[in-house]
Image (tube, rainbow, N blue to C red):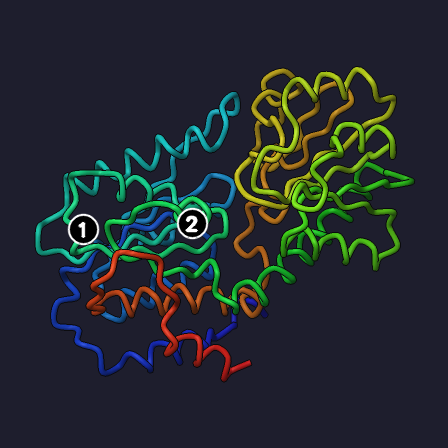
Amino acid sequence: MIDDYNYSLLDKITDSFQNSSRDSLENVHIWACQHILEPQEKMFILLSKFGIPAKNIHISGKIYSTNFEVLDELEKLGFETLQPTFDFTRTFDEQHKENCHNFFESFIQMNKTDDRVIVLDDGAELLNIFNNSDKINSKNIIGIEQTSSGFRKLENEKLKFPIINVARSAIKLDKESPLIARLGCDRINDVIKKYNISEPKILVVGLGPMGNNVLLILKEEGYLVLGHDTIFDQKTDILDLILKNKINVLIGATGNSILSEEQILKLESTINNEIYFISMSSADREFPSSFLRKNGKLDKSIHGDSVWNKIVLINNGFPITFKGKRYESTPLEIEKTIALLYGSVLYATNANLTTSELIDVPQQITDIIQNNE
């Protein structure tokens, strides 16, 4: 049973910090932008048990990855929770930036000069706002970033405070990408069955760790699958590739927009059959999702499918790996990533870092994870 999972790896991380000073943990504040799911809830509960007051842990969710049962539980346990609403006619990124600015303003109003501040981010939008502000005392701040897209936002920035780079940890890259890809492919199969796509012709755009794993899994399952990445092929136009190969399932795994509104209009006017857009990245940025939701038949549930003429936007353009469930992948599969985050937060509570740059996850944490595989 999933509910009986004991998170033994997180307990080992806790044990490794038993000799850390806890004298000033009442002055530690965590400002977290996170997926609000059961494994993350376990992490926050353990942080409060370690000694960081629940009221000092401020958590802002992303609408597409929030389970509202978990959100309610966190609130009842005394954590400071926030789940902004969502306007389907606008992009997630546009609204998320505004939400992070509002979250940051709450920090400014509450922050005291002697507080130790840990910014735990997913996508680096909140970290960027902290980093670009002249209202912070950077000596008291440590950041933690967990996504590759967030890492790319930060890697060329002049940082004012250190940021623990969970995103590029070998453990996360090697272990998480295949399991998330497997989950995504299971749900891609569900889409194919739901819409009775008799002869799927699939194009995966973006062949990083995630896209390449999706490509390999779908090929192993016997599908006709093509892959494209501008790193390897800058000359081929994606629209031409779709039309030439009569693609009817388009999977985006780039972390960026792969089709413009102009290309969408041309595609819709050219194809004879439905084409299904599926995201395997983050937010709703792989496709012109707000355009399709605004102009098509909108399913107002976050995880519904919206339709504009012959284009079907699966999961409203959000990653297929998030469907609003309490668990998306199993706790066993995701615990290593949670352990990286949890251990990084515990480390940050007492760390005395003198450089303002991206730093690796402490060896103390990665050794525990690797020794328990």
Q: Nearer the viewer, residue 214 or 106?
A: 214
Q: Residue at x 52, y 72 (%)?
A: 4
Total numbered labels = 2
Residue occupied by mark 2: 122
The image shows residue 263, relative to residue 201, as above or below, that is above
Tag 2 secondary structure: loop
Residue extending farthest to the right is: 199
Q: Nearer the viewer, residue 282 or 266?
A: 266
Residue occupied by mark 1: 138
Q: In the image, is 140 to the left or to the right of 174? A: left
Image quadrant occupied by the N terminus? bottom right
Mark closer to the chain start, 1 or 2 = 2
Q: Nearer the viewer, residue 69 or 26?
A: 26
Q: Position of residue 224 (x, y in %)?
A: 87, 47
The image shows residue 25, relative to residue 285, as above or below, that is below
In which image quadrant can residue 77 be found?
bottom left
Image quadrant occupied by the C terminus? bottom right
Q: Residue at x 17, y 40 (%)?
A: 108
Tell me how far mark 1 sits from mark 2, CA to CA: 20 Å
Do callouts 1 and 2 mark residues in contact (Cβ within 8 Å)? Answer: no
> What residue type is disc 1 on?
Ser
In which image quadrant can residue 317 be found?
top right
Kindly report which numbered mark, 1 or 2, lies closer to the viewer in this rendering.
Answer: 1
